[in-house]
Every structure is written in structure tokens, then in C-alpha cells.
Amino acid sequence: MTRSNTTDTTRTPLAPVHIAAICGSMRGDRSYTRVALALALDSARNAGATVDLIDLSTLDLPLCSGPDDTDDNPQIVSLKARVQAAQGILLGSPEYHNSFSGVLKNALDLMGGDEFRGKVFGLLGVAGGSAGAVNTLGHLRVVVRGVGGWSLPVQISIPNVGRAFADGKMVDSGLEERIRFLGRELVRFTRLHSLVPELEHRLIEIIDEDV
Ligand SMILES: Cc1cc2nc3c(=O)[nH]c(=O)nc-3n(C[C@H](O)[C@H](O)[C@H](O)COP(=O)(O)O)c2cc1C
């Protein structure tokens, strides 16, 4: 059998990973969601990824009008290009009335399969109340399924936002470590996921050699 007799001394380099985070708050640099996403991205960068924080408050996106949307809006073109460049996507939103923000939904609706299909998603939600952002996370998970993405099992719900942050910084070290874990896991699974086509190819080669 060719497989067991061959010692392959060449190592395939780790696939480059680019992570884009989309922040669904319009509060700019006062947004706790944005602070939490920045922590996850910092962790992703430490794990070897390049990162991009897409703050929807800095964009001037039109409302999605479905089939009437055109491709000539530079804000949409830029948003799509930034998301398309990523293999892994982090979605973060404040919990608004038991769901994620309409601003984030509109941004997601302006995009589609070209930007999302087959990509790995991490989810993060921030809530004012003690129940946390579990509805935000559940609803985002359904939307990710709708666009053909893969959501990580691990997700972050930040409850009682007033206690978790002070002076624009996270002050709950346990929560910060979990957010950083999400960033690392997103890089790890995005990398593994990007190897799947190559592994499939190699598996077929091995099977062909065996027969
Ligand atoms: C319109 C609106 C609805 C909200 N609904 C909820 C809610 O259902 N549950 C909750 O825990 N907090 C709710 N909040 C509080 C936000 O989740 C909280 O302020 C969050 O930190 C905002 O995130 P940001 O700092 O990233 O903008 C609501 C806030 C607004 C403005």
C-alpha cells in the first residue's frame, strides 16, 4: 500500500485565515458589542488570522429593497468585498426586543450566498438585562443556516452589560476569557474547514492508489 510506505517530508503550510466581524450596533465607539468583538478579533489575530472589524455605524447603507437592489452603491460594494474576503465571520449584536438589531439584519439582507455560503460563523450577543442575549444568538443561528453558513457551537451571551463593562472596557475577566476563546475557536474551525476540499482530494487519491 503506497500510503504506509511513503514518508512525506513536505508540510503543507497552514491555510491563511481572514476573519471579518460585523457589529450590529449603531453606537460606534460607545458600543459594548464593538468592544467585545474587538476582544474576539484580538484573540483571532493572536491565533494567526488577519482581521477586519466592520462597524455598521460608519457605513451609510440603504435599506434592503430585495430584487430592486442594484450593484452600483459603493457602500454595498465595499461591504460585500470586505465580507467576501473573509473565510470566517463573526456576527455581534445588541439584544433589541428579544432579537438582534434591525441594522444587522438589513446588512445581512444586502448580502447573500456569495458572501456567506460555506463559511464558518461565530456569534456574540450583548444584553442590558440578566436573561442575556440568548434570543439574539438563537435568531442569528437560524439566519446563518438560511445563508448556508456553519455556526460554531460555542457562542457568547453577555448579560447585564452595565456590570460587564466600565469606562468602555470589559471588566469581567471570566467573560473576557470566553470571548477570547470564541476568537480562537473561530480561527481553528475556519482553518480546519478550509482544509476540507484538499483532504477530500487527497482521500480520493489514496483510495485510487489502493484499488
Ligand atoms: C430598542 C432597544 C431594545 C432593547 N431590548 C432589550 C432586550 O430585549 N433585552 C435586553 O436585555 N436588553 C435590551 N436592550 C438593551 C441593549 O441590549 C443594551 O443596551 C446593549 O448593551 C446595547 O449594545 P451596544 O452597547 O453595543 O449598543 C434594548 C435596547 C434598545 C435600544
Image (spheres, rainbow, N blue to C red):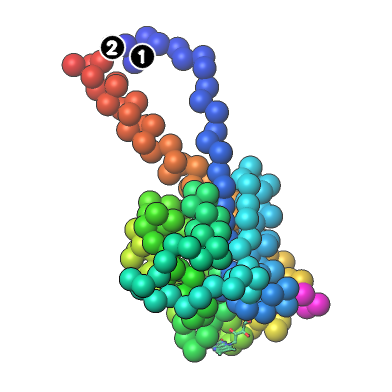
Q: Report whether 195 appears left or right of 48.
A: left
Residue 156 in picture, x, y percent from top left: 55, 68
Residue 27 in picture, x, y percent from top left: 67, 79
As drawn, 40 above or below 136: above
Other residues around mark 2 within 10 Å, as few (<14) / some (14–19) / many (≥20): few
In which quarter of the view is residue 37 placed? bottom right
| Residue drawn at the location 63% of the way across and 74% of the way down | 57
Residue at the spot of label 2 = 1
Residue 162 in picture, x, y percent from top left: 70, 84
| Stretch of the chain drawn in magenta | 164-168
| Residue drawn at the location 49% of the way across and 52% of the way down | 84
| Residue drawn at the location 38% of the way across and 51% of the way down | 118
Residue 139 in picture, x, y percent from top left: 41, 75
Q: Are marks 1 and 2 in contact (CB under 8 Å)?
A: yes
Residue at the spot of label 1 = 4
Residue 167 shown in magenta: yes
Of residues 84 and 164, the one drawn nearer to the viewer in this rendering? 84
Please identify the residue farthest to the front as the structure is shown. 72
Q: Quadrant of the C terminus?
A: top left
As drawn, 181 above or below 128: above
Indicate the amino acid at tag 2: Met
Residue 161 shown in magenta: no
| Residue drawn at the location 42% of the way across and 66% of the way down | 70
Indicate the amino acid at tag 1: Ser
Numbered circles on residues, count: 2
Please identify the residue farthest to the left as the structure is shown. 211
